[in-house]
Amino acid sequence: MPDLVQLAIPAFILLMVVEAVFDALMRRDLYEPRDTAASLTMGTGNVLVGLVAKGMVFAIFTWVHQFAIFPIGYQWWAWVLAFFADDFSYYWFHRTSHECRFFWASHVVHHSSQRYNLSTALRQTWTGGFFGFVFWLWMPLVGFQPIMIFTMQAISLLYQFWIHTEIVKHMGPLELVVNTPSHHRVQHGSNPQYIDRNHAGTLIIWDKMFGGFEPEQEPCVYGLTANINTFNPVRIAFHEWIDIWRDLRASRTWGKRWIAVFGNPGAIKHQDAVVHPYEAARV
């Protein structure tokens, strides 16, 4: 099965070039060479690691599907249901990635840039593909075909690429239903009122239903609440995992160990002192 995301890479690069040229003409200063290089390196690593992770996940989905509750095939209505099921799954995966440190350790990569442009969309995790799939496990169990699930996940990622831009301001009535650049800028903002808001993939309706929506008002300040200030891809990929290991070793009770691994990333308690904010720039 062809990987739609990999097939779209040339289009990603072309659109980045177009945005960068527009940026240069308008003197917006959206791009910084070292930051862009870091994002592209993270994206390349994500694609290479994904060759292994996606094979593993597809095998798991195929195994689970043999126990399917309903015999869902490839009818047109099944694709419609799969779209909403995937988008719903992504919403809770994304929200959990901001609220649980174990998942945040991978997702923090995507929020580590202090720039917001199309290259930021490619700044992706090297580790999350091996466990984030658990939020979609219910779909093959219900009866959705693994290929259908993978296709919808790819379509969601393709859609989310273009919303990483400051060039598009507002999209009128579409702002009520779908995730837009304006909504997603809020997601990447470290402004206090923007943290942990707008977790949508394609549809913004989930945020409005479950209380996670925040409209864009004041200009967004991008990056983490405690920026790591590095362009080193290895540091970007693993810094939060290293911090988790450090905090785990320093914890003296099982309760604190649990919090160190699975607590809210915004927690800053370590014994009775404030040590660090877990670099929580949860968009």
Image (spheres, rainbow, N blue to C red):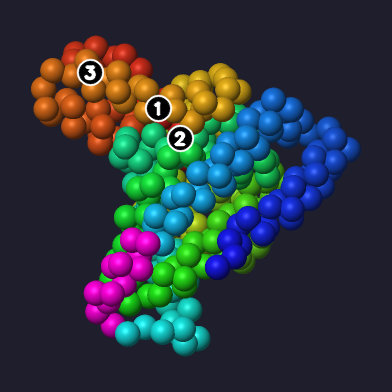
> Along the polypeptide, which appears first: circle 2 or circle 3?
2
- Say if 68 sits above or below 95 in the image: below
Could you tell me how far apart the alpha carbons at marks 1 and 3 are, in whole angstroms?
Answer: 14 Å
Q: Give the crowd class for mark 3: few <14, some 14-19, many >=20 residues within 10 Å.
A: few
Answer whether residue 233 is magenta in the image.
no
Q: Residue at x 74, y 28 (%)?
A: 33
Q: Which residue is mark 3?
A: 249
Q: Are marks 2 and 1 in contact (CB under 8 Å)?
A: yes
Q: Nearer the viewer, residue 175 or 184?
A: 184
Q: Residue at x 56, y 19 (%)?
A: 229
- Say if 6 sits above or below 27 in the image: below
- Say if 267 sits above or below 138 in the image: above
Return the x and y of residue 14 as percentages of the image width and height. Answer: 79, 50
> Along the polypeptide, which appears first: circle 1 or circle 3?
1
> Along the polypeptide, which appears first: circle 2 or circle 1?
2
Identify which amino acid the numbered label 3 is placed on.
Arg
Element assignment for label 1: helix
Which contiguous range is marked in magenta? 59-70
Q: Nearer the viewer, residue 228 or 216?
A: 228
The answer to whether one can see residue 49 in this image is yes
